[in-house]
């Protein structure tokens, strides 16, 4: 019930921001964004979105193979895109679909919880590490391009980047020393210690072992993630330059960095927040607010198409797992019945 209320409240907030901006830039921009999305240039945006998704899936597949020493994971894209759809359409940006992915991987591939859970956490760590670097870099480019940004925008941006930076620095400092983060949190909150063979500690150890910077697989994961973010940058820069022909490559990087701030806020499908960041980015660089709004809606359109595909596979996989459990339950009842009869 609490999650439903949270979803409704954040969706209302997103709609409020969206309506407010549409009143400023004009409702006709929705039609322009729709027509652009389904044009040739929009097809390129959609294609780059799917390439980015493929690289995300490739990274998770790579992590699972290294954790389990298995050669192949069948239909892994279906599971990945199912989790992506939940992350994108729920108020927990970038995190909501991870438990679903871990559960689906456990059920479909017969993995231990510590392996499936560790795989999605490692996947998120890779993503957030590069996300911070690209976002911070883009924001600095935005500020260095003669932009007169409001103090609120600067302070909020620095605060968000700072919080994530502190978390990642703390995390990697523990990893480098092979120290338990979970144990530190238990001590900090004065909670009773868990057993060393607890699944949470086992999962954490899998993560620590994988993310050793001395290991080849760590840098392979970083390389896949780097390639994925370069595709995301290309998508943003291509669309920005199409909307504003005089826009430079460097300014496009600044727009990409600032648009990422929409992901810090727990709004379904970044509704409203992406428009705000797009408008601030374009207008801050001397371009029109309308271009910023169209930019946001086209980017969301590409992401939403991928998310809708994910919903289809989410329903299909859920039905499959449910059916398997029902059959297993019926078979167990039959076996018990036969054993009693005997």
Image (cartoon, grey):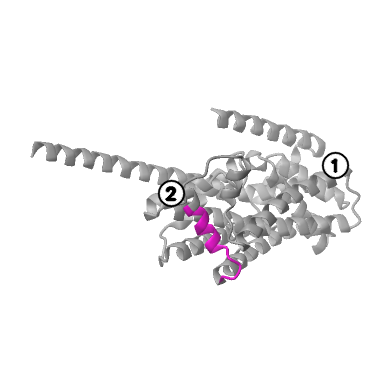
For the point 58% across and 44% down, which residue is it? Answer: 186
Which residue is depicted at the point 71% across and 56% down? 132
- The segment highlighted magenta reads 202-215
> Which quarter of the picture shows residue 76?
bottom left
Number of numbered discs = 2
In this rendering, position of residue 85 left or right of residue 341: right
Q: How crowded is mark 1: few (under 14 residues within 10 Å), some or many (20 or more)?
A: few
Residue 262 position (above or below residue 12): below
From this view, report whether residue 318 is shown above or below residue 245.
above
Residue placed under numbered mark 2 in the picture: 104
| Contact between labelled residues 2 and 1, with CB atoms less than 8 Å apart | no
| Image quadrant occupied by the C terminus | top left
Q: What element carries label 1?
A: helix
Q: Which secondary structure, mark 2?
A: helix
Is residue 37 among what the camera can see? Answer: yes
Query: Whole-percent x and y of residue 141?
Result: 83, 59
Q: Nearer the viewer, residue 13 or 22?
A: 13
Q: In this view, does 331 lie above or below 57?
A: above
Percent of width and height locating residue 243: 78, 54
Q: Which labelled disc corresponds to residue 152? A: 1
């Amino acid at each position: 019930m609490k999650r439903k209320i949270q979803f409704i409240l954040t969706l209302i907030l997103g709609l409020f921001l969206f309506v407010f901006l549409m009143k400023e830039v004009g409702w006709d921009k929705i039609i322009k964004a729709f027509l652009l999305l389904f044009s040739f240039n929009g097809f390129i945006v959609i294609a780059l979105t799917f390439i980015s998704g493929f690289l995300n899936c490739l990274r998770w597949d790579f992590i699972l193979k290294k954790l389990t020493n298995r050669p192949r994971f069948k239909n892994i894209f279906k599971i990945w895109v199912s989790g992506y759809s939940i992350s994108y359409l729920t108020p927990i940006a970038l995190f909501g679909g991870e438990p679903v992915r871990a559960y689906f991987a456990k059920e479909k591939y017969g993995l231990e919880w510590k392996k499936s859970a560790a795989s999605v956490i490692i996947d998120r760590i890779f993503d957030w590490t590069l996300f911070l670097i690209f976002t911070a870099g883009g924001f600095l480019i935005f500020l260095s391009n003669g932009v007169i940004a409001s103090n609120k925008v600067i302070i909020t941006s620095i605060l968000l980047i700072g919080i994530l930076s502190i978390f990642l620095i703390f995390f990697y400092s523990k990893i480098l020393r092979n120290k338990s983060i979970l144990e530190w949190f238990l001590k900090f909150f004065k909670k009773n210690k868990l057993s060393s063979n607890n699944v949470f500690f086992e999962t954490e150890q899998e993560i620590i072992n994988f993310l050793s910077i001395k290991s080849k697989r760590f840098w392979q994961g970083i390389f896949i993630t780097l390639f994925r973010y370069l595709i995301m940058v290309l998508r943003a820069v291509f669309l920005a330059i199409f909307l504003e022909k005089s826009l430079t490559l460097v300014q496009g990087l600044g727009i990409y960095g600032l648009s990422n701030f929409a992901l810090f806020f727990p709004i379904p499908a970044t509704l409203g927040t992406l428009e705000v960041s797009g408008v601030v980015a374009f207008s801050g660089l001397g371009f029109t607010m309308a271009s910023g709004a169209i930019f946001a809606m086209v980017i969301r359109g590409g992401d939403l198409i991928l998310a809708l595909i994910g919903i289809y596979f989410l329903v299909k996989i859920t039905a499959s797992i449910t059916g398997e459990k029902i059959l297993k339950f019926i078979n167990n009842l039959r076996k018990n019945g036969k054993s009693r009869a005997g």
